[in-house]
Amino acid sequence: MLKFFNELGVYFILLGKVFKKPDKTKVFWQQLVFEIDKIGLDSLGIVFIISIFMGGVVAIQTAFNIDSPWFPVYSVGFTVRQSVILEFSPTIVSLILAGKVGSHIASEIGTMRVTEQIDALDIMGVNSANYLILPKIVAAMIINPILVVISMFLGIFGGWLACYFTGLVMSAHYVYGVQLDFRGYDVFYALVKTIVFAFLITSASSYKGYYVEGGSLEVGKASTKAVVYSSILIILFNLILTQMLLS
């Protein structure tokens, strides 16, 4: 327990260094654009594939489990929409990004630590935490919600594709279910979760990489811990935010 509170304190001290005004604003914006490309655009492929198949699976499972005449056939589209928007896109995509982006951030910063590049920045008077970590956090909080919105559309489209090619549900019924009783607040709720998850992924992964000690073996362990910690935080805050925003 003492170790937990010690790490928590070090984490918040690191955040205090991160969220200071950048020494050179121009350099920050250049790094931000670079990180948006690296974190977001490089993840489009995996988001596309996961979202399409995720929506298709939800649609097929829902259609096969509607055996009672009490459930109208258009409930397939309604279920896919609600499942994708409320949970699958913001949470599952964030968990995938925790594995892809989180491990990369931890290994990148960890490698800089063990090769003494961070020490060199500190000696030159550069706020290394701010220079290395802040662009990553801001970039993820900007681009991840965009990825999740894309995932929502792709997930619903994937459900339609599954219904169309399997013949389980007519397109008109599916589209009607997707449009039924739509609330914009659901999208807002999902995007709030995504922004919080983006912050947790990047900050936790940066923390594990920034304070790594040893050599390449320790960098690998830090990368693994970054994914585990990020995933646990996502699941924990998913529960907290759901209770706060939907209750």
Image: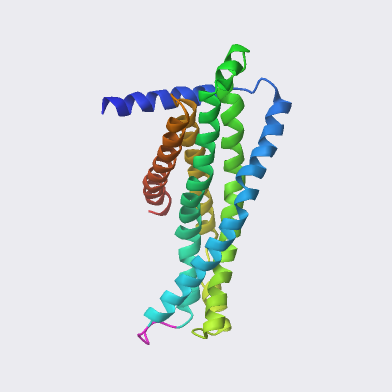
Dominant secondary structure of the residues highlighted in magenta in the image: loop
Q: Residue 201, can we see it?
A: yes
Magenta span of residues: 67-72
- Residue at the image position 58 percent from the left and 70 percent from the top: 157
Residue 166 or residue 146, whichever sits in front = 166
Q: Is residue 19 visible?
A: no
> Can you tell which quarter of the image residue 5 is in?
top left
Comparing 65 with 227, the one in front is: 227
Disc tally is 0
Q: Name the side, left or right, on which 41 lies relative to 164.
A: right
Q: Is residue 247 above or below residue 71?
A: above
Q: How is the image coloured?
A: rainbow
- The location of residue 204, given as percent across then percent down, is 46, 35
**Residue 21 in magenta stretch:** no
Taking 51 as reference, is 216 above or below it? above
Q: Position of residue 125 (x, y in %)?
A: 62, 13
Q: Residue furthest left?
A: 1
Q: Nearer the viewer, residue 122 or 201?
A: 122
Q: Position of residue 54 (x, y in %)?
A: 49, 66
Q: Quadrant of the N terminus?
A: top left
| Residue at left offset 46%, top offset 27% | 215
Q: Where in the figure is residue 43, as x and y percent of width and height? A: 60, 51
Instruction: Using the image, determine if residue 55 lies above or below residue 207.
Output: below
